[in-house]
Amino acid sequence: MNLSNGNRKKDSQDLSDTDSIRLMLVDDLEDVLRIESESYAEPWLREHFLYELQSSRVSNTVVIERKGRIAGYAGLWLLHPEIHITNVTVSMEYREQGLGTKLMEYVMNLALESNVKLVTLEVRHNNDAALALYRKFGFEIRGIRKNYYAAEKADALIMSRTMR
């Protein structure tokens, strides 16, 4: 599952009759920005995503589609021997339907295939749904970043999972 970033045509992983994960394309940006702005007090800007898609040598961003509609996305940095998850976000209309789990399964499979030793992330300390998801995948709290989410004056929990 060696996916690069950018403007490639669909290189998708079919998950069911209606869900698939594929590399994010620039054409997906409007849908991703809509999901980003509905989900976060301080959403990433268009420029952030464009950098990840077009310039970064370590970034991989994927989208999950349900019945042809973008329902969520995950961003990660391949910093061998580590993967850092920058975001896992599902549109409000598709939450609690297992799509976050599918995105995390994708990331963890990529980690195994890439012989990564460690997967890390930050998560808002009071994001119970995300905390439950990450714990389900074996992530543990390793530290705190005070006031990481400045607009909300919220701390981030640093979580990681060692891979075998």
Image: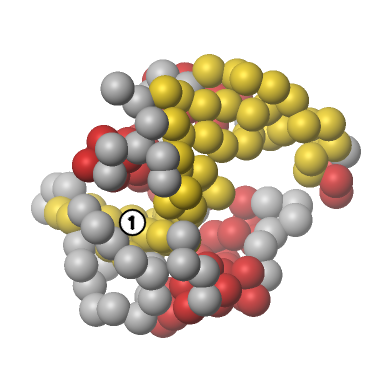
Q: Position of residue 93 (x, y in %)?
A: 46, 51
Q: Quadrant of residue 48?
A: bottom right
Q: Position of residue 94 (x, y in %)?
A: 41, 48
Q: Residue furthest front?
A: 81
Q: Quadrant of residue 2?
A: bottom left
Q: Nearer the viewer, residue 47 or 93?
A: 47
Amino acid under disc 1 = Ile
Q: Nearer the viewer, residue 100 or 74?
A: 74
Residue 31 in view here: no
- Residue at point 39%, 76% (across, down): 6
- Residue at point 46%, 61% (across, down): 59
- Residue at point 38%, 31% (across, down): 117
Looking at the image, residue 15 sits to the left or right of residue 39; the answer is left
Kindly identify which residue carries mark 1. Answer: 64
Q: Quadrant of residue 152?
A: top right
| 68 is higher (above) or lower (below) than 42 | below
Q: Position of residue 18 (x, y in %)?
A: 18, 55
Residue 34 in view here: yes
| 144 is higher (above) or lower (below) than 151 | above
Tell me how the rendering is colored. Answer: secondary structure
